[in-house]
Image (cartoon, rainbow, N blue to C red):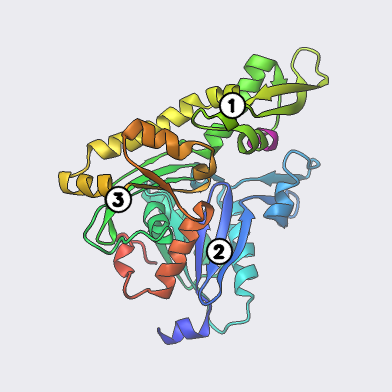
Amino acid sequence: MGLFSRLSRDIGIDLGTANTLAYVSGKGIVLQEPSVVAVDQITNQALAVGADAKQMLGRTPGNVVAIRPLRDGVIADFEKAELMLQHFIRRVHGGKNLVAPRVIVGIPSGVTGVERRAVIEAATQAGAREVHLLDEPVAAAIGAGLPVEEPTGNMIIDIGGGTTEVAVLSLQGSVISESVRVAGDELTESITQYMKKVHNLVIGERTAEDIKIRIGSAYPSNSNDDASIDVRGLHLLSGLPRTVLVKGPEIRESMTEPLSAIVESVKRTLERMPPELAADIVDRGIMLAGGGALLKGMDTLVSHETGIVVHVAEDPLSCVVLGTGRVLENFDQLSRVFNNGSRF
């Protein structure tokens, strides 16, 4: 470990569409907050970041805007993302060390060069001395405990908020990877649209997400099909608040299209796989990570469609940030996991 690393606390960040997590070397995961920032439009100052800002979504006065600066896994609003990153880095770094931190950021594998540059610039402006970008499927596989440094095939499906990452890894790198911008947000949006079309009920994003978590499922089962929930929203025809009872099977049906897109991306990756690695995957199974792994029956759906055993990571939400942390702690041994041009 070099002099700089001894004088600073290096940081690994999972800059997610829905949540941002941070890992500090020597401490572990120190931050897990929603990727939301509330800004005063007159002064351009951040009023709240993370959980406090999420409470403001849809509830702000005219001069305040609460937004998620990342969409589909990439920065959609650069200034707001920079404000959010600055807040998180200062919070976890504390400003107590003599040297600015080295920062590793997990990003979707399918982002463009311009999108990569935006992340690097945001992290640099937020106070990083050195920025490395790590593809999320690689980070998730490392965080889930897969032996990515060995010459054997490891398959990971990381279903986040904005993107689903499917990759086959071997010898610290991606052999095949695919990134589709269909994930948790699309599942939530499909519930919102279903409630509007079928029940004439307008609901917010937070309500739809709550429905998904409480009674949503990807595959039929007795426990899922018996679940039901009262949903409150605005009735389209009368314009008045109304409560509707919805059941588990209809919520699963509403998510059919995005779930099919995720399964198709898995199948396409399997079809492109070299035979030797395919044999490894059949033996070892597929690892499921990310928030989407927590959707009831997701592992059963993928297993049913592919015929391969599917395992859910021990802590699916933290896999990417744990992976960035492990790379920080073993930087020299795992430095080959970075793509060319990832260091600035």
Tag 3 residue: 284
112 or 238: nearer the viewer: 238
The amino acid pointed to by label 1 is Asp
62 within the magenta span:
no
Q: Which residue is mark 1?
A: 225
In the picture of the structure, the residue carrying the numbered disc 2 is 22
Contact between marks 1 and 2 (CB within 8 A): the answer is: no
Q: Is the residue marked by circle 3 packed among few (<14), some (14-19), or many (20+) residues within 10 Å?
A: some
Which is in the foreground here, disc 3 or disc 2?
3
Relative image position of residue 244 (x, y in whole percent): 74, 21
The amino acid marked with disc number 3 is Arg
Q: Amino acid at mark 2?
A: Ala
Left or right for 227, reference 148: right
Local SS, label 3: helix
Relative to 19, residue 253 above or below: above
Q: Please tell me whether residue 208 belongs to the stretch shown in magenta.
A: yes
Residue at screen point 48% across, 46% down: 73
Closer to the N terminus: mark 3 or mark 2? 2
